[in-house]
């Protein structure tokens, strides 16, 4: 009975917690968008549940294989249980710190890439020195942590109460180099909006 409780209770704890959070959140939200996003919390909890299930299995195996009286077996199993939990928390903490660092690094580089576009001679000649540059999308290849290409929507800065529609261009900026030593290059400026492009071709070759 205790083994079953360890497996179902502790082993699936991240899954149970995510389900409770999703259901509780739905009680205060009437938006259809909530159910388009919230279930992903349950999906994310699955790898963590796999880790806690593994800890539960190891704990049970250690208890079964330990020598001595039952109290000694339980004590040995508990030591292993808490040691594995501490290791799991440490790994999760390191992953979180790394993800936060990567996020800040990405935001910093995105700003530098936008400044590169604003100060590019071709962009200035077409859209002026005060062109509006808005991040549009990023492209990542392989195991690169940082994007290999940025896309920015570029337009002439609109005057207040201007009646003419805004004409957008899409600047594609290639990025290469290691972290802290990145180099940017303007690959092209496309006039095709995303909906008019062939998704299987390089936007700069359309």
Image (cartoon, rainbow, N blue to C red):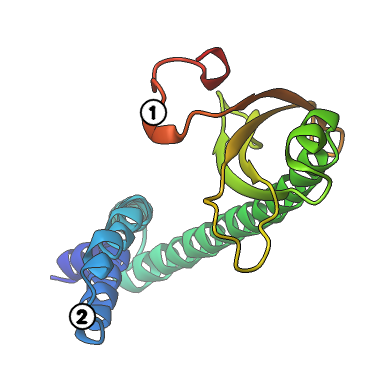
| Above or below, 65 relative to 71 | above
SS of the residue under disc 2: loop
Among the 4 quarters of the image, the one containing residue 188: top right
| Above or below, 133 relative to 49 | above
Q: Earlier in the sequence, mark 1 or mark 2?
A: 2
Cα–Cα span, label 1 and label 2: 34 Å
Q: Residues within 10 Å of mark 2 (few under 14, many from 20)?
A: few
User: In the visual, does 155 lie left or right of 49?
Assistant: right
SS of the residue under disc 1: helix
Q: Nearer the viewer, residue 145 or 192?
A: 192
User: In the visual, does 14 lie left or right of 162?
Assistant: left
Q: Which mark is residue 196?
A: 1
Query: Are dots 1 and 2 in contact, CB under 8 Å?
Result: no
- Residue at (26, 66) in percent of width and height: 33
x then y, percent, for residue 42: 27, 60
Q: Which mark is residue 30?
A: 2
- Residue at (53, 63) in percent of width and height: 89
Residue occupying the far front of the picture? 163
- Residue at (65, 53) in percent of width and height: 103
Quadrant where the N terminus is found in the figure: bottom left
Among the 4 quarters of the image, the one containing residue 25: bottom left
Residue occupying the far bottom of the picture? 28
x then y, percent, for residue 31: 24, 75
x then y, percent, for residue 20: 24, 77
- Residue at (19, 65) in percent of width and height: 8
Q: Nearer the viewer, residue 11 or 59?
A: 11
| Above or below, 149 relative to 131 | above
Q: Residues within 10 Å of mark 1 (few under 14, many from 20)?
A: few
| Above or below, 37 relative to 183 | below
Among the 4 quarters of the image, the one containing residue 187: top right
């Amino acid at each position: 009975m205790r083994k079953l409780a360890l497996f179902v209770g502790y082993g699936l704890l991240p899954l149970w917690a995510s389900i409770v959070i999703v259901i509780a959140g739905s009680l205060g939200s009437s938006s259809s968008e909530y159910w388009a996003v919230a279930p992903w919390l349950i999906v994310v909890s699955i790898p963590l549940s796999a880790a806690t299930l593994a800890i539960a299995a190891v704990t049970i195996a250690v208890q079964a294989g330990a020598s001595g009286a039952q109290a000694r077996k339980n004590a040995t199993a508990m030591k292993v249980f808490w040691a594995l939990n501490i290791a799991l928390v440490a790994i999760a903490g390191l992953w979180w710190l790394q993800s936060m660092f990567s996020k800040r690094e990405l935001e910093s580089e995105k700003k530098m890439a936008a400044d590169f576009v604003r100060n590019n001679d071709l962009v200035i000649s077409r859209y002026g020195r005060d062109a509006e540059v808005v991040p549009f999308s990023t492209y990542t290849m392989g195991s690169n942590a940082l994007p290999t290409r940025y896309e920015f929507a570029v337009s002439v800065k609109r005057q207040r109460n201007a009646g003419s529609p805004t004409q957008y261009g899409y600047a594609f900026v290639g990025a290469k180099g290691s972290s802290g030593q990145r180099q940017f290059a303007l690959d092209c400026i496309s006039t095709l909006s995303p909906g008019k492009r062939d998704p299987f071709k390089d936007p700069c070759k359309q």
